[in-house]
């Protein structure tokens, strides 16, 4: 493909970040979360790279799980949202998937399956996220009902933190205390920790951790710590300069005349736009790297192109390399200029951006 928009995926960095998660919780198993096509990085390629190391993988839905199984992935796979229809349960049994259970209808559906079925159930406790799960008042009864079913082979307790990334927030400690109170008389393995809790709340590590965004090298914490500083970005989004022109003071650039030049400027056009996944609402001044030099976006991002200021990079030419985010310009910083988070940047990359996978060892 000739169009230069490329996402370089560093599989060695992905494996490094998984090993880091494991090192932070050495007594826990680590479920590598690769939902949403591996946060836009390519779930199959990531799972294949980690299949000899991962304790398990986590996805959002059965379609994502079956895709991995059909690609040859044999490790356990957890359905983080569980199943949406009873018709999925035979597939869950066939593909030997683990499933979250977060409502009474799901328990009732499992109870109607053949007794020869043996489901690995992750029972969701709502400790304050108020998104999925049984309330603390309902949880013990749900656990008891599942425990009595011959179709259930194992139960794992799970909950999800609302504010684990905000280190000065008391919410995480409140959720931990509530979880411990509810589960104190219900013997089973447990999984509480997402990426932020893996990095910053060792009390939450327990039997399973569930690292997600940290595997992709993005720090979820409000304040970096020594662990999060060791993360390595996995995706580097690149393109090239395809045109250069001079504009004079008073002239405008791009749709809607959003950017007004206050001086003579040298402007480069980059083959990257919102149809590639670069956010249209990126502000003027959003950082961009050209030939390793930091510069900035000027003008509104269009479907296929965006413009950058080359005034202070006289050596830049047509064909110069542009890094939109990656190892030299973190996606989290770019996201702040777009009023969003790194998750949305990664998952927004579209299929016309060519992915190139590298798996070379590094001295991390």
Image: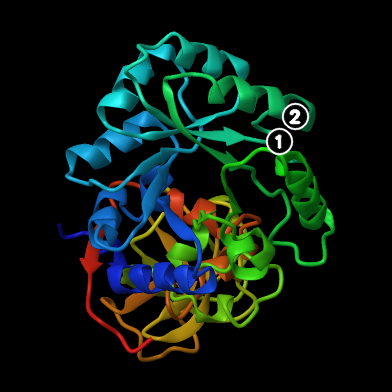
**Whole-percent x and y of residue 159?**
64, 43
Quadrant, the N terminus = bottom left
Q: Is residue 283 visible?
A: no
The residue sitting at 44% across, 64% down in the picture is 216
Q: Is mark 1 in CB contact (under 8 Å) with mark 2?
A: yes
Task: Find the residue positioned furthest to the top.
Answer: 112
Say which mark, if any, is on residue 135: 2
Q: Nearer the viewer, residue 132 or 43?
A: 132
Which residue carries the number 1 mark?
Answer: 126
**In the figure, 169 relative to 350: above or below?**
below
Number of the label disc, if any, that sits on residue 237:
none
Q: Is residue 155 left or right of residue 76?
A: right
How packed is label 2: few (under 14 Cα within 10 Å), some, or many (20 or more)?
Answer: some
Residue at point 60% right, 76% down?
249
Q: Secondary structure at mark 2?
A: loop
Residue 22: image location, x then y, percent: 46, 68
Give the total number of marks visible in the rendering: 2
Q: Report how far apart the C-alphas of labels 1 and 2 lie in the structure.
A: 5 Å
Q: Nearer the viewer, residue 177 or 216?
A: 177
């Amino acid at each position: 493909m000739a169009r230069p928009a490329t996402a370089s995926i560093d599989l060695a960095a992905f494996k490094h970040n998984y090993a880091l998660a494991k090192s932070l919780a050495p007594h826990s198993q680590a479920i590598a979360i690769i939902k949403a096509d591996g946060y836009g990085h390519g779930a199959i390629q990531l799972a294949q790279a980690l299949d000899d190391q991962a304790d398990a993988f986590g996805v959002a839905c059965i379609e994502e799980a079956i895709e991995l199984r059909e690609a040859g992935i044999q490790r356990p796979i957890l359905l983080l949202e569980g199943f949406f229809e009873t018709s999925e349960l035979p597939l869950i049994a066939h593909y030997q998937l683990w499933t979250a259970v977060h409502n009474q209808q799901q328990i009732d559906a499992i109870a109607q399956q053949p007794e020869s079925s043996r489901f690995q159930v992750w029972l969701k406790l709502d400790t304050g996220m108020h998104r999925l799960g049984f309330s603390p008042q309902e949880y013990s009864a749900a656990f008891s009902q599942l425990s009595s079913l011959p179709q259930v082979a194992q139960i794992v307790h799970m909950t999800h933190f609302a504010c684990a990334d905000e280190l000065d927030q008391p919410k995480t400690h409140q959720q931990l205390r509530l979880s411990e109170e509810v589960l104190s008389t219900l013997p089973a393995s447990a999984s509480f920790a997402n990426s932020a809790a893996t990095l910053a709340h060792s009390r939450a590590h327990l039997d399973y951790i569930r690292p997600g965004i940290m595997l992709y090298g993005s720090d979820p914490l409000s304040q970096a710590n020594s662990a999060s500083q060791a993360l390595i970005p996995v995706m580097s989004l690149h393109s090239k300069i395809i045109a250069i022109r001079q504009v004079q003071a008073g002239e405008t650039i791009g749709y809607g005349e959003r950017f007004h030049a206050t001086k003579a400027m040298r402007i480069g056009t980059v083959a990257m736009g919102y149809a590639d996944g670069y956010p249209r609402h990126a502000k003027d001044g959003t950082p961009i790297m050209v030939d390793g030099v930091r510069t900035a976006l000027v003008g509104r991002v269009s479907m296929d192109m965006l413009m950058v200021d080359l005034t202070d990079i006289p050596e830049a030419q047509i064909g110069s390399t542009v890094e939109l985010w990656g190892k030299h310009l973190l996606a989290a910083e770019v996201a702040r200029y777009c009023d969003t988070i790194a998750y949305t940047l990664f998952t927004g990359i579209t299929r016309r951006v060519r992915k190139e996978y590298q798996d070379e060892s590094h001295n991390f």
